[in-house]
Image: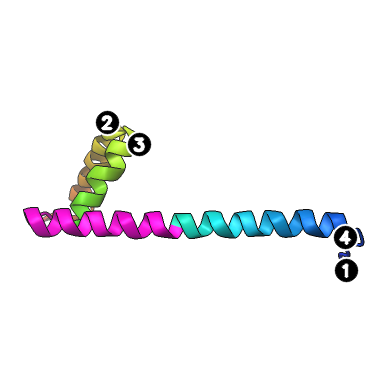
Amino acid sequence: MAITISSPEDKKKIMAAVKEISDSMTRTEAERDLIKDIIKDVSDNFQIPRKVVKKIAVTYHKQNLTQVEQEHEEFVELYDDVTKVSSNP
């Protein structure tokens, strides 16, 4: 099944949309680079691991500290449960 666009006007509209998408992707890439640079600067200046800086920023952005705490607590409980070796096999 081949898709064909016969109308020159429709082709122009599609191409305009493709260019707009590409421009948006360029802006997104630039924002990602900025975020990486900010995380690196904070990490370097305050000796905080990059992973921690990013997690703080993401948690702040999503405003979901309670959920993050709950997920961590569940992880720790499961980890403890799985890794504790019973003395009676």
Residue 24 position by quadrant: bottom right
* Nearer the camera: disc 3 or disc 2: 3
Tag 1–tag 3 contact (CB < 8 Å): no
Q: In x, y percent, where is residue 3?
A: 86, 64
Residue 12 placement, left or right of 64: right
Residue at 20% of width from left, 50% of height from top? 53
User: Is the residue marked by circle 2 packed among few (<14), some (14-19), or many (20+) residues within 10 Å?
Assistant: few
Q: Earlier in the sequence, mark 2 or mark 1?
A: 1
Quadrant location of the N terminus in the rendered image: bottom right
Q: Amino acid at mark 3?
A: Lys
Q: Which residue is mark 1?
A: 2
Q: Earlier in the sequence, mark 1 or mark 3?
A: 1
Q: In x, y percent, where is residue 38?
A: 24, 54
Q: Earlier in the sequence, mark 1 or mark 4?
A: 1
* Nearer the camera: disc 2 or disc 4: 4
Query: Which of these two is toward me, 8 or 58?
Result: 8
The residues colored magenta run: 29-49
Q: Earlier in the sequence, mark 3 or mark 4?
A: 4
Tag 3–tag 4 contact (CB < 8 Å): no
Tag shown at residue 66: 2
Query: Which of these two is toward me, 13 or 29?
Result: 13
Q: Amino acid at mark 4?
A: Pro
Residue 57 placement, left or right of 89: right
Judged from the image, the secondary structure of the residue bearing numbered disc 4 is: helix
Q: Which residue is mark 4?
A: 8
Q: Amino acid at mark 2?
A: Thr
Tag shown at residue 62: 3
